[in-house]
Image (cartoon, grey):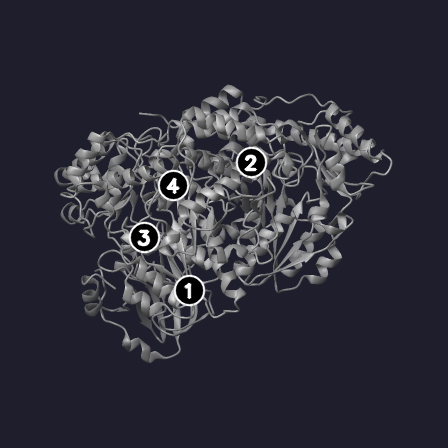
Amino acid sequence: MNFLPNTDKDREDMLKVIGVGSIEELFSDVPSSLRFQGGLNIPPGLSEYELAKHMAGLASTNTAQDFVNFIGAGSYDHYIPSVVRHVLGRSEFYTAYTPYQAEISQAVLQSIYEYQTMICELTGMEAANASMYDGASAAAESVTIASGLTRRKRALVSKSVHPEARTVISTYAEAQDIQVEEIDYKNGVTDVGCLAGRLGNDVACVVVQQPNFFGLLEPVDEISARVREAGATYIVSVNPMSLGLLRPPVEYGADIVVGEGQVFGNPMAFGGPYLGVMAVNKKYLRRMPGRLVGMTTDGQGRRGFVLTLQTREQHIRRERATSNICSNQALNALAATVYLSWVGKKGIREVGEQCVQKAAYLAGKISGIKGFSIAWEAPFFNEFTVKCPVDAGKVVDALLEKGIIAGYPLGRSYPELKDHLLIAVTEKRTRQEMDDLVAGLEGLA
Amino acid sequence: MKYPENLKYTKDHEWVRMEGGKAQVGITFYAQDQLGDVVFLELPEVGTEVEAGVMFATVESVKAVSDVYAPVSGKIVEVNEALNDSPELVNEDPYNNGWMCVIELSGPSEFDNLMDSNAYQKLVEKGGE
Amino acid sequence: MRSPEPLIFEISKPGRKAYSLPALDVPAKSLEDLLPASEIRSEPADLPEVSEVDLVRHFTRLSQLNHGVDIGFYPLGSCTMKYNPKINEEVANLPGFNCIHPYVPEELAQGALQLMYEFQDYLAEIAGMDHVSLQPAAGAHGELTGILIIRAYHRSRNDLKRTKILIPDAAHGTNPASAALGGFTVVEVPSDSRGGVDIEALEEAMDETVAGLMLTNPNTLGLFDENIERIEKIVHGKGGLLYYDGANANAILGISRPGDMGFDVLHFNVHKTFGTPHGGGGPGSGPVAVKAFLEPFLPVPTVVLDNGKYRLDYDKPQTIGQMKSFYGNFLVMVKGYAYIRSLGPDGLREASRNAVLNANYILRRILEYYDLPYDRHCKHEFVVSPSRIKRNTGVRTLDISKRLLDYGVHPPTNYFPMIVDEALMVEPTETESKETLDYFADVLIAIAKEAYENPESVKSAPHTTVVGRLDEAGAARNLNVRWERPE
């Protein structure tokens, strides 16, 4: 199957206009020694039906979709309303490129402006960009912003931040000679004493996650005070879904808010594409990477939207740009915009409350099972850590038989927590599913 | 008057107005015209030491960023704060209200190395640098 | 004329809702028993309150204000706006791809891992490389990945003096930005009179302090660099590595492979070359392919096949680390994979051959009116300049682009590459018919004539869009980047 409209006759006519005898002649500037001989060693082309069948076969070789999922750890199984797929399926949105030509890109531009507004509402920050690749890369780029603004080269990152986000931060930071130091956790949250000991006027930023990777609420005010004292940038990585219920990061002094926006209308999809959320206060605006949409007017005074502050970006500032980002996650941001319009002002609070209630119910039940306990006391949103009587990986394996993926074994990224299991719920998990999990765990006690 | 005769000019399109050991600095009519609508300026803080020929400020239009080089060496003693809210002054009135800063010269001799209006106009007519 | 659409916030009305959730089926506790009162939000986030009908109409009407590949021609240079096959969208929506958490046990995701494994293989074969990482989320992300690999390679050999990356002046802006983000100083190499890399300048710039050269081939002028073999010798001769920016790979599929040209590392833009949609700016996917000696430095994880089981391999002690969470933009890989399976080796080669034919056809049709800075056959795209028109009428590239909007065509890339005055960069792609190409050429010619006869009409374009030229300076001076509810 291919998608070429031209007929042999068309090609012949076109070659005549060009003044060559064959398409081959158009490649005469490719040295013959570099011409690829023979055919590429990839399978022959398929008809649409064959392709559909092949892809359905691969999809059904996966079986995870048939399990009840209790893994969170940065990707959450929230309900995605049908309107999301409907709007994302409008090819005016998905077959467009970056809205450089504003006059014929008002749909993309206005929806980004709506998205920016919603992120500002949730976080309390003054400006949000059009999206980053994901929460982890947004965190990494925010460390770069902080280092550039403070002209300092140390970044303190709590060990209760998502392990993959920490790895990405280190990957980015290493190239810019920013020294990343990890701050230990104590009782499941950032050890503020340890943080205070490491802070100083050479620290560019402190990165914490709220709720943290273990699901717990961090002492964000106490951390904020320490960060202020040191004159560092306070970077907070949030679960944006929690912000319907929990207070916005602006209230505890965040300078840069990042987060994984997958929770808003984007499927778990084996890890991507997701949505990097980034919001800042005005002071940081001109250092913010990524695209930004602003409202303006045309010559007749009609309202319209354009990409603005483009001089920050690579296509103008080249090696002095705030970042190299070009393509972003626009369609995922549109999913978030549609999702947030669907849940609205009241629904997002209700989703948050259901998460808290269900997580509390499940945690209560599990703590009643002999040998199992809730690892730490701090309050949590939709995710919590269970200390198991055996290796948590074995718990997960054992529950697979019952059609349940019980959670994320923390030993995968914290060797000291081999018997700890991270369990998440969403509004989708029913009492029956949670009771089934509890019954399965009881069988292991 | 695109290039007033009482000012001196650099090949990088800055102008200089000398007033008692101090140099008022801005960008020329040609520079602002090439840039288009100026939307933002990043100016140095008062007290900053600058060196002739070294970048000390940037001017941004919608689609371009241009470096501004110090025409003379010295210390920044005044910055045009009005440009923060009204960057368009650089377009509308480049030689007066659109001035950027005042430099207290450390070596007055440098002033004599700058171009006069005629020489600068010839440079611009060749298409600048 | 289409009318503007209010903001979703402006159609919001207190008490309306679109959502429905299952009733809470566990015993409800008082919220204050579960969370400290101080952690609970006092003011609700002011999200819209709309009905489902409001919502659907809002986004549907809004969508109608946009141009897309499905609506009309989109010859945006260097962006490869080819047709996005619908079957690929459909298969990417399968629950077996959508409803799997990235941390599920590997035995529950063998189909996904197999797809990634085979996609790695196909891309390596197309590139003429040995190993692939699918992790980068976009082209620029792939560039940064490649640059970090180059950096890690030199460091692993304790070769610490290589602090520079050479980049031709015609390069995409992402190249210098990626090199800088990767910790390198950027040194620009000029182009020669044929539009390729200036070999003498390259020889002069290339020494033991240079880590590598980033090159797009064909370059942003749409020209294949005829001296690529000499370039390879110069860079490798001094111990540097060669990075291939795959943004223009749509010209060379099955025709010439970057690995065979001597490149050591490259990225592909799946959303350009392999037919996945651009989504209004993203998501893309920017896989990186390397020669065998660079494999130890790839980001983790990659997918390997062990005893008939696919698994994620994190065991790379020299890895540069991770570029993002998890494994990359998986659903984009699904579509790119489906594209390659649809076309097969012959279809890919034909795609490139027709992309090049289409570009050359438009070029020859408009040459009487527009100026060609380098008179050669182009590859998949070309750059012309309306410099004669500008000189005689004052009509500029921007004006011509805006006038194209009135004809239902997306304008070519404007003012890039910067080495061509008033550049218009046209990339038709292979999925456009001769009729579409003729229409576009006719329109470009008509606008050129109009510029002489009625320049004001071109300068004041567009005339038929939902808004006219917008005040971008005003937008930047008086920033308004979020909506505020009027008091």
Amino acid on which disc 3 is placed: Leu
Displayed quadrant of residue B19: bottom left
Q: Which mark is residue A34?
A: 3
Mark closer to the chain start, 1 or 2: 2
Q: Which mark is residue C240?
A: 1
Q: Chain of mark 4?
A: C
Amino acid on which disc 4 is placed: Thr
Q: Chain of mark 2?
A: C
Q: Chain of mark 3?
A: A
To the question of a shared chain for discs 3 and 2, the answer is: no
Camera-side residue: C142 or A32? A32
Mark 1 surroundings: few (<14), some (14-19) or many (≥20) residues within 10 A: many
Q: Which residue is mark 4?
A: C273
Q: Which residue is mark 2?
A: C112
Camera-side residue: C250 or B6? C250
For label 3, the SS is: helix
Q: Nearer the viewer, mark 1 or mark 3?
A: 3
Amino acid on which disc 1 is placed: Gly
How much space separates mark 2 and mark 4, taking CA atoms?
22 Å
> In the image, is residue C189 above or below residue C409?
below
Mark 3 surroundings: few (<14), some (14-19) or many (≥20) residues within 10 A: some
Percent across and percent down for residue A299 are: 30, 37
Q: Mark 4 and mark 3 in contact (Cβ < 8 Å)? A: no
How much space separates mark 3 and mark 4, taking CA atoms?
20 Å
Q: Nearer the viewer, mark 2 or mark 4?
A: 2
Q: Is residue A398 visible?
A: yes
